[in-house]
Image: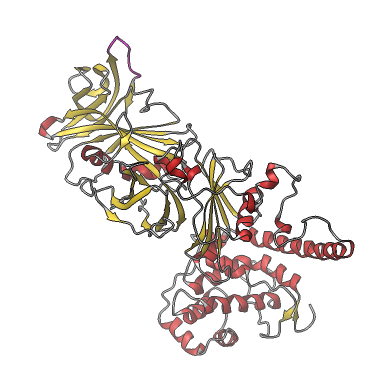
């Protein structure tokens, strides 16, 4: 590096060596998320040689005991630190950012006050003295310590960033040479174009090549669903303001076929990530919340492509970058095709409703009396206003938003209930052996005491959640009546269903969660072909007495309890419920006899 000039490679080496140090500094000044601190630090790298004479290098702090002799500060690091400070001070989350910067430089960088003043002036702080005073009087900012794993645990990212930058510089030079050769030699056919560099190599005339052609996208009319023999995603019309933006549609198709390394790709469990086998169906292309969003359907999957409208705006859309999300939807019928998630933030989601949906409302699933809900406004394309996402933190289940959709007389005329479980398709909520919509009074009461357990099935590719009451029981000591419920979260792929049984006694609050008595995964239990159940728990009555409670499905004719801690020894009861006195630490084995003499699988209670 010549005097007064910062070489790009020297800056890259300094970033790799001091990456964690720079991120911690940015994080402390921002008073914000570690993610922003990482992004800001990465952008501090120059793209070409720059002047390094803004600040003289200062001596390094005295070495700690046992360390080697201290050397002068690296000018490349000092320059990067200045860039990080300027960027952090330009967009702070905390108005006291200059004071935070002074505090961080004093405690993280171990700089003296004169050096801090000099650096703050270079970072365009108007009054460095005031910043130092505030840092002295109100040192109320916690410096990022070992608990800030996102700050300290990713220095490898800097090495990868530098590697990729050098790769692209090399590739750029090769591309320039190739362009010059192409200009001299000429290239026949349609190899040139605004999106040519992004196209994967394909054999001409194949379905794979046509799948990348925006002109080959399948589009249907607005009224196609009225004449269709099967009403599902295949009869959704193309909606949105960008359905004719060929450049956007080509980027979405190319990303689906072969996503770049910087694209965030996610897929629901069991969903193939490969390209569409042929031209997919265009469902939506439009602008929403600072993003261009495209929804595509290939008969097996729905794909959602999103890119920021302004990548340099600093908005949440710009921070999220380009993303591709895939979700399996094979076999979706009319009610399963009622809506798709268009955008989702940490707090809310917007849905695109099917063309046959006439009414949409938000209901609180924790309140069985909330049947009508709050009507949701929709634009001309069928996009809903934002719907809050449920709070899934432990012991914070105070409301659970549901989506109530009612179709036209020709399709899905009955109101259907859905909830967002992190997928492109909201999960349908049903009740009983017939899997009818969970809209009846008794079904809503069971659902209200079940939904707070649904965080266990978030992001699992759930298609529908069905609750089924398999037993009722009068409780000892006059504690009222309880119901036993089995809930099955079925997936789009068929396998991987999650099942839980619940004990739901009388409760003052209608949304108080039931007690989970058993869980199972990838099982047929609680399904249409396996309704045999047996479960139980230790329960304490309002009078302070402990009991073993057990329940089986209606096919059980007798229940038995064996083990230690039963007050009166082994017990039996006719029917499909049992209640016997027990010690608090009882260990009991349950079994059931069914009509025809077939035994039920034993259940052990700790």
What is the residue that sits farthest to the left in this orientation?
A: 478
- Helix, strand or loop for the magenta stretch, by majority: loop
Relative to 145, is 55 on the left or the right? Answer: right
Question: In the drawing, does residue 566 fall left or right of residue 102?
Answer: left
Q: Outermost residue, right direction?
A: 185
Q: Residue 51, located in which quarter of the rendered image?
A: bottom right
Image location (x, y in percent) of residue 328: 51, 41
Relative depth, front residue between 391 and 3: 391
230 vs 555, left or right, is right
Q: How is the image coloured?
A: secondary structure
Magenta span contains residue 142: no
In the rendered image, residue 407, in percent from the top left (x then y), is placed at 35, 45
Residue 599 is covered by the magenta coloring: yes
In the rendered image, residue 442, in percent from the top left (x then y), is placed at: 22, 37
92 up-or-down from 167: above or below: below
Nearer-the-camera pick, 8 or 198: 198
* Camera sees residue 110: no
Specify the quadrant that holds the C terminus: top left
Q: Quadrant of the N terminus?
A: bottom right
Q: Residue furthest top?
A: 596
The number of numbered badges drawn on the structure is 0
Q: Residue at x 37, y 26 (%)?
A: 528
Q: Is residue 428 visible?
A: yes
Residue depicted at x 76% and y 46%: 204
Asked if 352 appears above or below 183 in the picture, the reply is above
Residues in magenta, as a range: 595-601
Q: Quadrant of residue 350?
A: bottom left
> Is residue 534 shown above or below 448?
above
Residue 320 percent across, percent down from the top left: 54, 61
In the image, 506 versus 585, the foreground residue is 506
């Amino acid at each position: 590096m010549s005097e007064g000039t910062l070489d790009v490679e020297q800056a890259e080496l300094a970033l790799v060596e001091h990456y964690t140090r720079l991120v911690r500094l940015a994080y402390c000044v921002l008073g914000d998320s570690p993610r922003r601190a990482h992004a800001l630090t990465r952008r501090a790298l120059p793209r070409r040689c720059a002047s390094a004479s803004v600040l003289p290098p200062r001596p390094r702090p005295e070495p700690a005991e046992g360390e080697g002799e201290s050397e002068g500060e690296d000018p490349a690091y000092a320059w990067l630190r200045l860039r990080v400070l300027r960027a952090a001070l330009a967009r702070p989350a905390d108005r006291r950012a200059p004071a935070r910067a002074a505090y961080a430089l004093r405690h993280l960088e171990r700089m003296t006050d004169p050096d801090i003043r000099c650096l703050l002036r270079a970072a365009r702080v108007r009054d460095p003295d005031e910043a130092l005073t505030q840092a002295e009087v109100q040192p109320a900012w916690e410096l990022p310590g070992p608990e800030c794993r996102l700050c300290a645990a990713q220095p490898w990212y800097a090495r990868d960033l530098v590697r990729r930058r050098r790769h692209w510089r090399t590739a750029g030079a090769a591309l320039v040479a190739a362009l010059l050769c192409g200009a001299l030699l000429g290239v026949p056919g349609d190899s040139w174009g605004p999106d040519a560099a992004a196209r994967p190599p394909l054999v001409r005339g194949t379905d794979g090549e046509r799948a990348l052609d925006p002109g080959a996208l399948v589009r249907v009319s607005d009224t196609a669903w009225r004449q269709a023999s099967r009403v599902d995603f295949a009869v959704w019309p193309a909606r949105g303001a960008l359905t004719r933006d060929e450049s956007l549609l080509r980027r979405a198709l190319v990303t689906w076929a072969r996503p770049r390394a910087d694209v965030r790709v996610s897929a629901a469990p069991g969903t193939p990530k490969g390209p569409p086998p042929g031209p997919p169906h265009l469902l939506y292309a439009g602008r929403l919340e600072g993003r261009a969003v495209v929804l595509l359907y290939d008969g097996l999957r729905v794909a959602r492509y999103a890119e920021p409208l302004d990548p340099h705006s600093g908005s949440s859309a710009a921070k999220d970058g380009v993303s591709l999300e895939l979700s399996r939807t094979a076999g979706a019928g009319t009610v399963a095709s009622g809506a798709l998630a268009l955008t989702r933030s940490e707090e809310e989601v917007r849905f695109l409703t099917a063309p046959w949906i006439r009414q949409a409302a938000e209901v609180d699933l924790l309140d069985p009396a909330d049947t009508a809900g709050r009507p949701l406004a929709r634009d001309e394309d069928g996009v809903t206003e934002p719907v809050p996402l449920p709070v899934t933190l432990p012991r914070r289940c105070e409301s659970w938003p549901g989506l109530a959709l009612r179709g036209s007389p020709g399709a899905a005329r009955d109101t259907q209930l859905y909830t967002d479980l992190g997928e492109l398709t909201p999960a349908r909520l049903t009740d009983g052996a017939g899997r009818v919509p969970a809209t009846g009074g008794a079904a809503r009461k069971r659902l209200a005491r079940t939904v707070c357990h649904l965080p266990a099935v978030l992001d699992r590719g759930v298609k529908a959640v069905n609750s089924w009451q398999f037993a009722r029981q009068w409780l000892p000591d006059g504690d009222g009546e309880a119901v036993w419920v089995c809930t099955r979260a079925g997936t789009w792929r068929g396998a991987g269903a999650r099942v839980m049984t619940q004990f739901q006694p009388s409760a003052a609050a209608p949304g108080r969660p039931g007690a989970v008595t058993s869980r199972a995964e990838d099982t047929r239990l609680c399904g249409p072909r396996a309704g045999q159940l047996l479960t139980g728990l230790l329960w304490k009555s309002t009078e302070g007495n402990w009991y073993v409670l057990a329940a089986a499905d209606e096919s059980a004719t007798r229940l038995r309890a064996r083990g230690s801690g039963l007050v009166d020894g082994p017990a039996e009861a006719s029917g499909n419920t049992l209640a016997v006195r027990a010690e608090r630490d009882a260990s009991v084995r349950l079994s059931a006899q069914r009509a025809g003499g077939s035994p039920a699988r034993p259940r052990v209670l700790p």
